[in-house]
Amino acid sequence: MAGPVEVGAFAAGRIAEVVSAKPEAVLGVATGSSPLETYRALAARRDAGLDLTRVSAFALDEYVGIAHDHPESYHAVVHREVVEPLGLDASRVRVPDGLADDLDAACEDYEAQIAAAGGVDLQLLGIGANGHIGFNEPTSSLSSRTRVKTLAPRTREDNARFFDSPDDVPMHCLTQGLGTILDARRALLVAQGASKAAAVAAIVEGPVSSMWPGSVLQLHRHATLVIDEAAASELR
Ligand code: F6R
């Protein structure tokens, strides 16, 4: 039965194809549990000779108001789970600045940095149980750009496992918008486990709707979902 390891191996293969064809590829990277097996499998490919040193990367999102060296800030998570194991050049890796004095300006600047890099070649995504991608919570505009969002109560509950107390989970984040994600040349969403089954069914078989933000991928020309059997269990 296909599980998280198979999902990670398949997704890493797709990323490796993109990087082999274009060693200076721009990757969009997700945090959270879903992509961990993908990063593990990609690190194994790196050990086997895949050169990732010229890759650039843009994180999807960041919490507002937690220090960059806090272990659960996405600055720290991206460094620990992506930059180090994959041997990326840290100077080519960007994470939105959730500590900026002017958060709106930081979001605009992030969009400008993605554009200056030539856009994202492949955007890796996870999905929230409520259907969010990035931190585009339900009701997000389908054409949204990088901006400040309030985290949904369900997302704060789901992410409480990473913090000492549920109250420590930030209320706000910066996230690439759904329009930003749609601009990536390829989108690759990984989902594992029964807790994602309802969201997977809604975004694949339901209508395109801001109530299930991941459904926007139906509008993407080159979107791939890699899911295990448990995450597929509510597909008809
Ligand atoms: C993370 C992100 C989120 C997560 C989603 C699933 O950068 O943008 O959309 O992908 O919340 O999280 P996990 O994988 O921890 O279940």
Image (spheres, rainbow, N blue to C red):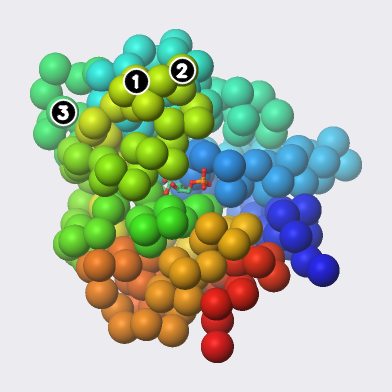
Locate residue 173, reporting x and y percent: 27, 34
Quarter of the picture holding the N terminus: bottom right
The reply to whether residue 17 is in sight is no
Residue at the spot of label 1 = 168
Q: Residue at x 62, y 58 (%)?
A: 193
Please give the residue where the numbered disc 2 appears in the rendered image: 164
Q: Residue at x 19, y 61 (%)?
A: 139
What's the residue type where badge 2 is placed? Answer: Asp
The yes-or-no answer for disc 3 within 8 Å of ligand 1 is: no
Nearer-the-camera pick, 127 or 221 = 127
* Badge number at residue 93: none
Foreground pick, 79 / 51: 79
Q: Is residue 184 visible?
A: yes
Q: Dot 3 corresponds to which residue?
A: 103
The residue at the point 71 percent across, 60 percent down is 7
In the depicted structure, whether residue 48 falls above or below residue 183 = above
Disc 3 marks a residue whose amino acid type is Leu
Q: Residues within 10 Å of mark 1 (few under 14, many from 20)?
A: few
Residue 6 appears at what percent x and percent y?
A: 78, 60
Q: Earlier in the sequence, mark 3 or mark 2?
A: 3
Instruction: For the residues labelled 2 and 1, say whether their Cβ atoms are less than 8 Å apart.
Output: yes
Tally of marks: 3
